[in-house]
Image: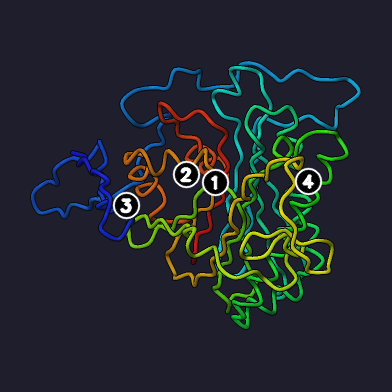
Amino acid sequence: MAAAATGLPSTTGGFRTPRVAVEPEDARPAASGESALSVPRQPTAVGHVGSGPPTYDAEPTALPPTDPDELDDLVADTVLDGARYGTSTLRAASVRGDSARYRGEPRRDALLTARFGSGEQALVLVAMATGARATPGAHRAAAEACRWIARAVGRSHARLSDDIRAARRGDLKSGLHRLTDRSLGKLRASAAEQGVEPEEYTAGLRCLLLPADPECRTRVFFGVGAGGLFRLRDGEWQDIEPRVAEATGDAVVGFGSPPHETPGGDRLTMDLGITTPPSPYEPAPRPPRPPFRFRASIARPGDTLLLCTGGMAEPLRGEPELAEYLTTRWSEGEPPGLAAFLADSQVRVKGYADDRTAAAVWEA
């Protein structure tokens, strides 16, 4: 008989979920003198978890409207990818949310996977982005953000790969900070060209760098915006998203533009250092940008690292049954195939209908 398990938050911030062995339904008592062999098996995939099925249909219903002169603007409902390098196996998927499927809106999430270099010097990039909610070009901004950061990483991949293998954490953090800011700066420039506010053409951007060298188990996360970074280790989910306090600090050399005011709040005129009071005719200052987040961690054999956008992170944090279900699916045996990973990553939870983008890395 299958036992029930309850995922409870641990004192360390992880989701503590006991392992459950499921006995096959056709198991029979062994005849006298025979030995019985009970083989635990992976639980059957499910469509949803939680208190009940979501309101929306489980499958896509409406397609987004299409401009015949803008066919390059089309976004597929689902994107699926995977690879195996060194000691890691990668699975990645991006799925349009239930709400967007119902309303005939395009997927605001974008996903890009790329390999730069060859052999043990290669570097694998996973980039995912989420466009601003309720803006017409959200899907384009997300796709642009992924392409810009991929170009930047690709052009610097040899240096980045060397820094990862040599554990130059400071160089990595400052370098990736600059690349991220420049990439998002391209979006701000694109917004100006389109005549829209920067807040209407922007995206949260989250990336993962995986070296192909089997001797290097360093996994690097960086980016800005909402989402989650989780690690499944020894049957327990750990929320390892860098906190805001860890993401802030002194300005990075070479990052962004010179300050527009002194620490005391006085405005600077040109480069002369002359302070002037703020003009009442100037527009109100824009809200602060989301902080840059960075984490370089060492993977252990048996770990599963999960990077995701908010559409996946929120139900994983808010519904213990989802954390429990993924634990039973991903803790034992080989990494799932592409179809199985897609099924797992889109298990639905009532009350969570946003796009979901997730990339998971299994360590041999």
Above or below residue 268? Residue 105 is: above
- Which element type, helix, strand or loop, lies under badge 1? loop
Q: Earlier in the sequence, mark 2 or mark 4?
A: 4
Crowd tier of the residue under label 4, counting other residues whose Cα lies within 10 Å: few below 14, some 14–19, many 20 or above = many
Amino acid type, mark 2: Ala
- Closest to the camera, between mark 1 and mark 2, is 1
Q: Residue at horizontal 85%, vertical 20%?
A: 67
Look at label 4 and name its amino acid.
Arg
Query: SS for tag 3?
Result: strand
User: In the structure shown, which secondary structural element does the residue marked by tag 2 occupy?
Assistant: helix
Evaluate if marks 3 and 4 touch, with contact meaning CB atoms under 8 Å apart.
no
Task: Check disc 3 and report the residue beneath it.
Answer: 15
Considering the image in quadrants, where does the N terminus appear? top left
> Which residue is label 1 attached to?
226
Side of 310 where 9 appears, left or right: left
Distance of label 2 from label 3 (alpha carbons):
13 Å
Local crowd at mark 1 within 10 Å, few (<14), some, or many (≥20)?
A: some
In terms of depth relative to the viewer, which is nearer, 251 or 315? 251
Disc 1, disc 2: CB below 8 Å? Answer: yes
Above or below, 299 relative to 244: below
* Residue 115: quadrant of the picture: bottom right
- Sequence-wise, which precedes: disc 3 or disc 4? 3
Name the residue tied to disc 2.
313
Q: Classify residue 26 by image quadrant.
A: top left
Q: Which residue is mark 4?
A: 188
Mark 4 secondary-structure assignment: helix
Q: Is residue 262 left or right of residue 22?
A: right
Distance from disc 3 to disc 1, alpha carbons, whole Å, reads 20 Å
Label 3 Cα crowd, 10 Å radius (few <14 / some 14-19 / many 20+)? many
Does the image show residue 281?
yes
Mark 1 residue type: Ala
* Residue 115 seen in the current view: no
